[in-house]
Amino acid sequence: MLQVSYIRDNREQVLERLAVKNFKQPILVDEVIQLDDKRRSTQTQLDSVSAQANSASKQIGDLMRAGKKDEADAIKANTGAWKEEIKQLGDLLTAVEEELQQKLVLLPNLPHSSVPKGSTPEENEVVLTNGAIPELPANALPHWELAAKYNLIDFELGVKITGAGFPVYKGKGAKLQRALISFFLDEAEKAGYDEVMLPLMVNEASGFGTGQLPDKEGQMYFVGNDNLYLIPTAEVPITNLYRDVILKADELPVKNCGYTPCFRREAGSYGAHVRGLNRLHQFDKVEIVQVVHPDHSYDVHEKMSLHVQGLLQKLGLPYRVLRLCGGDMSFTAALTHDMETWSAAQQRWLEVSSVSNFETFQASRLKLRFRNAEGKTQLAHTLNGSALALPRIVATLLENNQTEKGIKIPEVLVPYTRFEWID
RNA sequence: GGAGAGGUGUCUGAGUGGUCGAAAGAGCACGCCUGGAAAGUGUGUAUACGCCAAAAGUGUAUCGAGGGUUCGAAUCCCUCCCUCUCCGCCA
């Protein structure tokens, strides 16, 4: 959520930045400013009437104690009008605040100055490409056929017990999942992240805190009996660990990592590009999250991006880094780098990680502050990144590493899988 | 699921209608003391919003949340949420 005071003081800049994100309702900016004016004047009125009423109450108390009941009653006679006015102004203030809030949450985060303008994925900027694109023989198989051939993943069984998009991993397929999770967590720990293991369902306040609600309500599974949402990413429970928290300056940066399954409804996305592991309703992911001082968040973003790239390099996967254009970025992000690996059999790039700086956008919803050098509270910056999401990594690994004698496991994973080949 | 207890500041914990944003203690910060430390001692120590160019200052709100009674609510009433204990069930 953007801060009203910032919008008020930087109207032109806000409009300009929103345009980079192709924001369709710039009128909201002026509406927010107007509502805020109204909010402030209403509060000023309310405060002054309340102050009068408070001082009258105090007088009454003093008089009663002094035994001057008549004088107290005389003041009491005048309080009716104030009460009415306080109630009316209070109701008005609540209504204005609600309306302001409703408009405010519709404003997306402002993109960083390095974010290219654009509205489609084609307009994302390729920052770098790394690793050799493997040449596969003509009879190379896509991962869903490899998964069937080597009995690694059973999509049909998943359909039977749950539904499409809920795969069943078997044998070496299951072990590969476990190996990747452990590998990613160990790498994160080496990079200084403290591991947490989290609830897989969150309440509404948490969904709001990180920006899933109300914007992306339809993307989450909702457990109505208990008013809980299945997490679409570990970002939600991890970042919400710090909701309503004021950190000491020396507690920054906060670095956490965690593995969780992720649940996404992915409503409306069907077709060839969702085959196999390309898009699932449930998948596994290791997430890294940082809460940092605003002065450092872009350096940290770069470091997180490099951490993710390091994982891909260790796994020997060719990848590229995209700086997302304004229109392709999420509602909440100020800057996002997507990492994509080259799927040799599908001949396309697959997104495996997204590293974002949210600046204060989540922090303002979360009320996540720290005490700055002047001793005042200040909103922190939050960042997160997938490190990494498993399914497309598995897809790419299977496809790119397929040989005549089977699928070769990358060396760094062998200590975790305890097998070198899937054959 | 049944029965009971309770939610106060960083923590412990007082407070059953007015001077309570809230005693006291602990913790923390700064100072004094000390060769240094401990002890001792002094001061300070919530958040948000408004007014003000800003600081200073000042106003308002906040004692789980929301509503009500009252001139006045941490304190009384109602609703909801949460936590704990016992019983039952159970990985």
Image: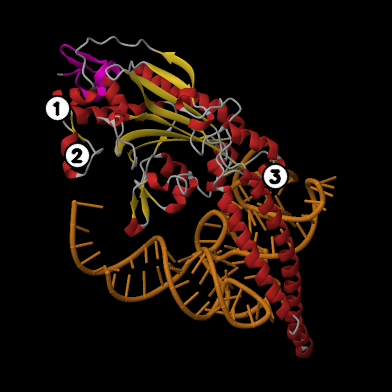
The answer to whether any part of residue A124 appears in the image is no
Residue A370 drawn above or below residue B75: above
The mark that comes first in sequence, 2 or 1, is: 1
Residue A206 spot, x, y in % from top left: 45, 49
- Report which residue position mark 3 lands on: A8
Answer with left or right where residue A408 lies relative to residue B8: left
- Report which residue position mark 2 lands on: A158
Residue A103 in the magenta stretch? The answer is: no
The residue at 68%/46% (across/down) is A5
Q: Nearer the viewer, residue A182 or A359?
A: A359
Residue A421 spot, x, y in % from top left: 18, 17
The residue segment tinted magenta is A398-422
| Badge number at residue A31 | none
Residue depth check, mark 1 versus mark 3: number of the one nearer the observer: 3
- Return the chain for callout 2: A
Q: Marks 2 and 1, Cα distance to the nearest angstrom?
A: 14 Å
The answer to whether any part of residue A353 appears in the image is yes
Q: Secondary structure beneath disc 1?
A: loop
Q: Nearer the viewer, residue A118 or A396?
A: A118
- Return the chain for callout 3: A
The mark that comes first in sequence, 2 or 3, is: 3
Q: Which amino acid does the dot numbered 3 rest on?
A: Arg
- Report which residue position mark 1 lands on: A151
Callout 1 crowding tier (Cα within 10 Å): few <14, some 14–19, many ≥20? some
Q: Which amino acid does the dot numbered 1 rest on?
A: Asn
Residue A54 spot, x, y in % from top left: 72, 72
Q: Quadrant of the C terminus of chain A?
A: top left
Residue A201 drawn above or below residue A21: below
The mark that comes first in sequence, 1 or 3, is: 3
The residue at 65%/37% (across/down) is A14
Callout 3 crowding tier (Cα within 10 Å): few <14, some 14–19, many ≥20? some
